[in-house]
Image (cartoon, rainbow, N blue to C red):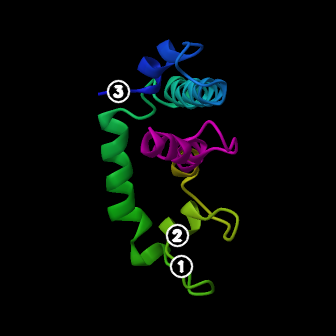
Amino acid sequence: GESVWDACFLIGARDIPLHDSLLLIALLAMTILIQAVFLGIVLKIFTERQFDDEVLERLEDWRLNIGQHIKYYDKNTLTSLTQRICQPDLYEAEMSSGTSERVKQMSEYLGNNPFLNGPMLVKVALVM
C-alpha cells in the first residue's frame, strides 16, 4: 500500500503542483510527529515491567480476601476498603498502604502529562 513515506518522493516533482507538494510536506511532518509521540509513550511506559506475576497474584488475593471483606466495610461512607483505596481523593483509607502505593503506580500509567500516557497511546494507535 501507498503511504506518506512513499508520497514524499513526489515532493518537488515537475508534474506535481506546488500546493500539492506543500500538502505532502505537511502530511509528512504530521506523520513524523505522530510516530514520535507513539515512540515516546512506548519508551516511557512499556520499557520495564511494573508488576511481576507474584505481585499481581497478591493484589488479586488482597482484593478478594481483604478489600471486599465485610469486616472492612465502612458504614459511614458505604464503601468497601477497595473503593477507598482506589479513590484516595474522596476517602481516607485506614490501612493497606502497600496496596495504596500500587494504586499510585497504576495512576502513573494514566499520567498527568496529556501526551505521554497510556490513554494517549490508544489514541495515537487509532490515528495510525
Question: Magenta segment, which residues?
Answer: 103-128
Residue at image point 35% right, 43% down: 56
Residue type marked 2: Gln
Label 1: how many residues lie within 10 Å, few (<14), some (14-19) or many (20+)?
Answer: some
Q: Is residue 17 above or below residue 65?
A: above
| Residue matched to label 1 | 79
State the separation of the CA atoms marked 3 and 2: 50 Å
Residue type marked 3: Glu
Q: Are marks 2 and 1 in contact (CB under 8 Å)?
A: yes
Q: Position of residue 30 (x, y in %)?
A: 60, 31
Q: Are marks 3 and 2 in contact (CB under 8 Å)?
A: no
| Residue matched to label 3 | 2
Residue at image point 41% right, 18% down: 6
Task: Using the image as rendered, state which of residue 48 and residue 43 is in the foreground.
Answer: 43
Task: Using the image as rendered, state which of residue 123 and residue 95 is in the foreground.
Answer: 123
Residue type marked 1: Thr
Q: Is residue 114 above or below residue 15?
A: below
